[in-house]
Image (cartoon, rainbow, N blue to C red):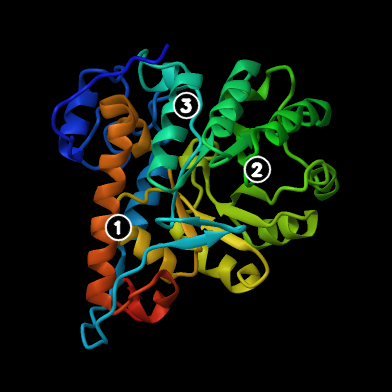
Amino acid sequence: MIRKETRRDKMNIQEVLEASKGIMGPFCKSCPVCNGLACRNQMPGPGAKGSGLGAIRNYEQWQKIFLCMDTITQKKQLDTKIQLFGSTFELPIFAGPVGGVKLHYGERYQDWEYNQILVNGCAREKIAAFTGDGTDPHVMEAATRAILEMGGVGIPTVKPWDFDTVKEKMKLVEQSGAFAVAMDIDAAGLPFLKNNIPPAGSKSVEELAQIIQLTQKPFILKGIMTVQGAQKALEAGAKAIVVSNHGGRVLDSCPATASVLSEIVDVVGDQMKILVDGGIRNGLDIFKALAMGADAVMIARPFVNAVYGGQEEGVTALLSKYKEELTDTMLMCGATSIKDINRTMIRFGGVKE
């Protein structure tokens, strides 16, 4: 049974973060800005691998991109909606998959509880959550059941297990009615998965193609950081990719996602959908990612704080913050819809690209 707490007034994001401080474990500090500094290389915990600079680098790179203000534009109603694989979403934001929440964030929730709250909260705000997978089969079973209960609004994310294990998990995906399915191929580098049975590991293009053929659902491959990787994902049959370095948790000294996004978009952006994650922490960052060519963004760690601090109400508070910041940026940069956002509206390091 998931613990539910009732309040008379709606929480704002500051109240959610404050509430989460008393619930999160010793590793996450519920910082006002989740920039990787306080947790750095704390693993277990939400930190990054090795030096811990991966997550910090992700965040800081977005701060090096500047916005071009232009308010000489026709007044229109602002529209933040996007479409993905035939479904319409209120915002170009997806909640990212997170596993091991009890280990890394605090004992309040098991993975299955976290996934259920996240899926419900996101669906009710008309966006979708990617759900995590784990060595415990119950995690995927519960996640797909939660997605089914919300009418298929959610994206089960399967770890890169061996083919037979993936095949069994894909049966659960089909039963969920999910509108798409994902695999976080970069999870091959997670320390706590490397030596587990069933084995998780890298896949060849041929192996990925075999997996993708198990379903008719659009297949999203998360963990792409190079043009070559994007091309291989396309060759295997993926309909979308997530430009992601797993929050810096699988490879130290990896570039920031914002550093590689544009070059990937330029090569495959007209052939598949592209999402991006990594240090995106406000509506301005979201706007920058869209201007660089991403179709949407994925955000993970802040949703953990939102769930721990306010359950579904915390998710609502976080998304309200993002929407307010995004619409304000759109207004000040001359974009009235997500499709209007383009690279002329940003500058890199103060110099136009």
Drawn side of residue 106 relative to residue 20, left or right: right
- Residue at 29%, 52% (x, y): give it: 322
Mark 2 sits on what residue?
181
Task: Reply above or below: 156 against 299.
Answer: above
Q: Earlier in the sequence, mark 3 or mark 1?
A: 3
C-alpha gap between disc 2 and disc 1: 26 Å
Residue 120 drawn at (x, y percent) = 43, 33
The nearer-to-camera label among 2 and 3 is: 3
Task: Reply above or below: 39 against 207.
Answer: above
Q: How many marks?
A: 3
Drawn side of residue 116 relative to residue 280, left or right: right
Q: Look at label 3 and name its amino acid.
A: Gln
Q: Earlier in the sequence, mark 2 or mark 3?
A: 3
Residue 229 drawn at (x, y percent) = 68, 56
Location of residue 28 by image quarter: top left
Answer few, some or many: residues within 10 Å of disc 3's Cα (few below 14, many 20 plus, some between 14 and 19): many
Mark 1 sits on what residue?
283
- Residue at 19%, 25% (x, y): give it: 19
Mark 3 sits on what residue?
116
Q: Earlier in the sequence, mark 2 or mark 1?
A: 2
Q: Residue 38 or 113: which is nearer the viewer?
A: 113
**Callout 2 secondary element:** strand
- Residue at 46%, 16% (x, y): give it: 110
Q: Look at label 1 and name its amino acid.
A: Gly
Mark identifier at residue 222: none
Residue 56 drawn at (x, y percent) = 35, 45
Q: Residue 79 or 196: which is nearer the viewer?
A: 79
Q: Residue 20 or 41: which is nearer the viewer?
A: 20
**Callout 3 secondary element:** helix
| Res. 300 visible in picture | no
Answer few, some or many: residues within 10 Å of disc 1's Cα (few below 14, many 20 plus, some between 14 and 19): many
**Callout 1 secondary element:** helix
